């Protein structure tokens, strides 16, 4: 069922319940008021009858005349009965069967005044004491006029209810249509967005209502999608370039070598060049495999407690094995009194890859003879590694893409590399709930900051 139909039905149902409740309350209290008011009138008639029938002796002529006048102001369909205490009928007037039984008289005697209904007829019984004894005075009548008015009110309420329901249905349909206009607009705009139009955004994102919040959330999702598509496009372009370059070089060397017979030394040179290109392809394949491993479900990675400073020294040793001429200075900016604050929780192999890649990048882009400075810092609940080089730097535009696999800045394309190191480090740190930040100034150098949460609270028996 469409939302508009649901809203209309809900809107109508709520109003229908309110109208039914309101109508029942009006009818009920009107009926109660009519009944009580008519009982009072009958009670007065009972008193008038008692005065007319039982209290005529000893009264002046004018008082008798007044009682007679009052008595003859009858109610519609009135019937009165006066019984002696022993149940003998003393006086009867008016048509209508009251059906008086002894138990009714006993009840009147006990309660003094009794009110009850006999079909549509209302009866009031009064226990009256007179000079010549005690009597039961019963007066009854039918409130025909008020009952007709009550019936008329019932008809009005029923007709008014169904008439109001028609109006409410129409109003609910219009109301739901107006309420859904923003959603309809959002749906219309979303339908226009395709993979080629990810730059488009929803227009209803400036308000403070729920629809605006939905539009804002959707626009943020489009921002992420656009960024992902752009990264994917850059990744494919750069990956194709990185894969094509060594293959093209290998094919070119082989074609030249096969054109004419060569000296053994020439063949050896060609094979050595092809071997270097093959190693580059191997490194590239290993990098792709490591990126794939760093993208797996974090719950499947085995985590252990590690000393962050020991991890840095191990990474330092590995970098020196690969780049013997590297100059790296590791500094403890604020070594803690409690060495357990240097403990982190993570996968040693993956974190080692991330730190080695960062250190290798710094060495690779630092001029020969210059030193790379690495500092271990404790700040809050984070263990931080800052690696600063004095290399070429990265411009602001290229800095936006440093975490895109295979992306390489224009000013470093002549330096050997594949653009995998930083993207791989970023993914590994995300798996460990850490962060990596790159800051750079052209011709002044680059600083890479790695932040990893401490595992201090995970150490057993510490508190």
Image: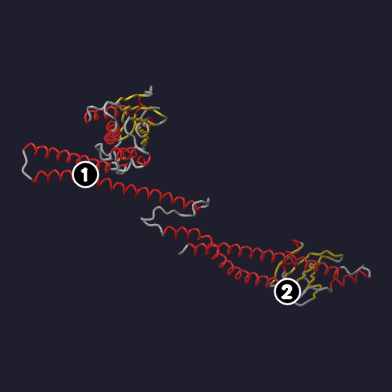
State which mark lies toward you, 1 or 2. 1
Q: Which residue: 20% across, 40% down?
A: 280
The one nearer the camera, 425 or 244, is 244
Compared to residue 381, the image places residue 226 above or below, namely below
Residue 412 pos. (x, y %): 29, 37
Q: In which quarter of the image is the C terminus?
A: top left
Neighbour class for label 1 at 10 Å: few (<14), some, many (≥20)? few
Residue 216 pos. (x, y %): 46, 50
The one nearer the camera, 326 or 252, is 252
Residue 238 pos. (x, y %): 28, 45
**Secondary structure state at the residue bearing disc 1:** helix
Compared to residue 227, the image places residue 343 above or below, namely above
The one nearer the camera, 60 or 414, is 414
Q: How many marks?
A: 2
**Is 371 left or right of 321, judged from the image as shown?**
right
Compared to residue 336, the image places residue 133 above or below, namely below
The one nearer the camera, 356 or 57, is 356
Q: Mark 1 points at which residue?
A: 245
Q: Which residue: 39% across, 53% down?
A: 198
Q: Name the residue under label 2.
A: 144
**Is 73 left or right of 244, judged from the image as shown?**
right
Q: Which residue: 40% across, 52% down?
A: 199
**Colour scheme of the rendered structure:** secondary structure
Residue 257 pos. (x, y %): 10, 43
**Secondary structure state at the residue bearing disc 2:** helix
Identify the mark nearer the N-term, 1 or 2: 2
């Amino acid at each position: 069922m469409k939302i508009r139909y649901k809203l209309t039905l809900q809107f109508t149902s709520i109003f229908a319940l309110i109208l039914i409740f309101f109508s029942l309350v009006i009818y009920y209290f009107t009926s109660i008021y009519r009944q009580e008011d008519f009982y009072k009138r009958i009670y007065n008639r009972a008193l008038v009858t008692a005065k007319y029938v039982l209290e005529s002796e000893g009264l002046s002529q004018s008082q008798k005349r007044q009682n007679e006048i009052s008595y003859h102001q009858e109610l519609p369909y009135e019937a009165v009965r006066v019984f002696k205490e022993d149940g003998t009928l003393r006086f009867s007037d008016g048509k209508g069967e009251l059906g008086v039984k002894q138990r009714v008289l006993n009840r009147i005697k006990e309660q003094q005044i009794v009110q009850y209904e006999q079909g549509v007829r209302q009866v009031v019984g009064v226990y009256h004491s007179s000079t010549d004894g005690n009597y039961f005075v019963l007066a009854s009548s039918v409130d025909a006029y008020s009952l007709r008015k009550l019936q008329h009110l019932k008809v009005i309420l029923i007709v008014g209810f169904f008439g109001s329901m028609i109006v409410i249905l129409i109003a609910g349909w219009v109301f739901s249509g107006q309420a859904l206009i923003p959603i309809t607009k959002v749906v219309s705009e979303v339908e226009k967005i395709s993979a080629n139009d990810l730059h488009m955004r929803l227009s209803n994102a400036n308000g403070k209502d729920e629809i605006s919040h939905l539009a804002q959330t959707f626009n943020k999702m489009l921002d992420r999608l656009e960024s992902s598509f752009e990264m994917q496009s850059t990744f494919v372009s750069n990956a194709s370039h990185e894969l094509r370059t060594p293959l093209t070089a290998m094919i070119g060397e082989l074609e030249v070598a096969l054109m004419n017979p060569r000296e053994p030394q020439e063949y050896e040179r060609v094979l050595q060049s092809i071997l270097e290109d093959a190693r580059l392809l191997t490194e590239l394949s290993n990098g792709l495999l490591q990126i794939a491993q760093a993208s797996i479900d974090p719950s499947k990675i085995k985590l252990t407690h590690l000393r962050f400073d020991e991890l840095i020294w191990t990474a330092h040793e590995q970098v020196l094995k690969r780049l013997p001429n590297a100059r790296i200075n590791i500094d403890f900016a604020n070594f803690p009194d409690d060495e357990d604050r240097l403990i982190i929780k993570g996968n040693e192999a993956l974190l080692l890859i991330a730190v080695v890649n960062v250190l290798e990048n710094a060495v690779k882009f630092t001029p020969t003879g210059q030193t790379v400075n690495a500092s271990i810092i404790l700040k809050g609940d984070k263990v931080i590694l800052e690696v600063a080089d004095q290399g070429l730097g990265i411009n602001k535009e290229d800095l936006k893409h440093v975490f895109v696999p295979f992306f390489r800045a224009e000013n470093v394309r002549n330096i050997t590399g594949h653009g995998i190191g930083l993207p791989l480090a970023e993914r590994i740190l995300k798996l460990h709930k850490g962060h990596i930040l790159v800051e750079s100034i052209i011709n002044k150098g680059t600083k890479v900051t790695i932040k990893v949460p401490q595992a201090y609270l995970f150490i057993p028996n510490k508190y």
